[in-house]
Image: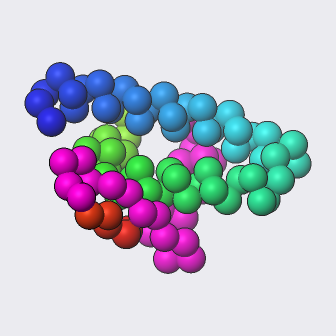
Amino acid sequence: MNEEDIRRFRWLVAELFFLYEGQYEFYLKGHISEKSWQPKMAALRGILQNPIAAEWWAMRQAPLSGEFREYLESIRDSTDATWTYQVIGSSTSETA
């Protein structure tokens, strides 16, 4: 990806995490079931496996709540679920 693509991807990642933070609040209040919540967290874990997203996460510039950030840290390296993603420009999948 060129620099412009990387910049756009970082904004997309930030937006996804902001959206999921709101859903996390609904999950904690019981408005989202465990069955619906787990695939969302598997997707976020997968996104954090991307080197650009991992760099974004490490910079800690997103104004996420401490509680949500701690929750994501606790599940980020979890091995209870796998995430398969397609490497752009490749015909093979990788499992993280």
Which residue lies at the image location 42% right of the left edge and 63% below the top edge? 84
Please state if 35 lies on the left or on the right of 71 as rendered.
right
Image position of 64 with respect to 94: above or below = above
Image position of 58 with respect to 94: above or below = above
Location of residue 89 in the rendering, given as x and y in whole percent from the top left corner: 18, 48
Which residue lies at the image location 40% right of the left edge and 29% below the top edge? 12
Location of residue 39 in the rendering, given as x and y in whole percent from the top left corner: 63, 56
What residue span does the magenta drawing correspond to? 64-91
93 or 20: nearer the viewer: 93
Quadrant of the rendered structure where residue 5 is? top left
Q: Residue 28, can we see it? A: no
Task: Report the residue that reaches farthest toward the right.
Answer: 30
Which residue lies at the image location 68% right of the left edge and 34% below the top edge? 22
Task: Report the residue that reaches farthest toward the bottom.
Answer: 79
Task: Report the residue that reaches farthest toward the front.
Answer: 91
Location of residue 73 in the rendering, given as x and y in whole percent from the top left corner: 49, 59
Q: Residue 65, can we see it? A: yes
Please state if 20 lies on the left or on the right of 87 as rendered.
right
> Quadrant of the image for the C terminus?
bottom left
> Quadrant of the image for the N terminus?
top left
Quadrant of the rendered structure where residue 60 is? top left
Location of residue 41 in the rendering, given as x and y in whole percent from the top left corner: 59, 55
Quadrant of the rendered structure where residue 62 is? top left
Decide whether residue 69 is among the magenta residues.
Answer: yes
Please state if 8 lies on the left or on the right of 75 as rendered.
left
Decide whether residue 66 is among the magenta residues.
Answer: yes
Count of residue discs: 0
72 or 95: nearer the viewer: 95
Q: Tell me which colouring the rendered structure shows.
A: rainbow
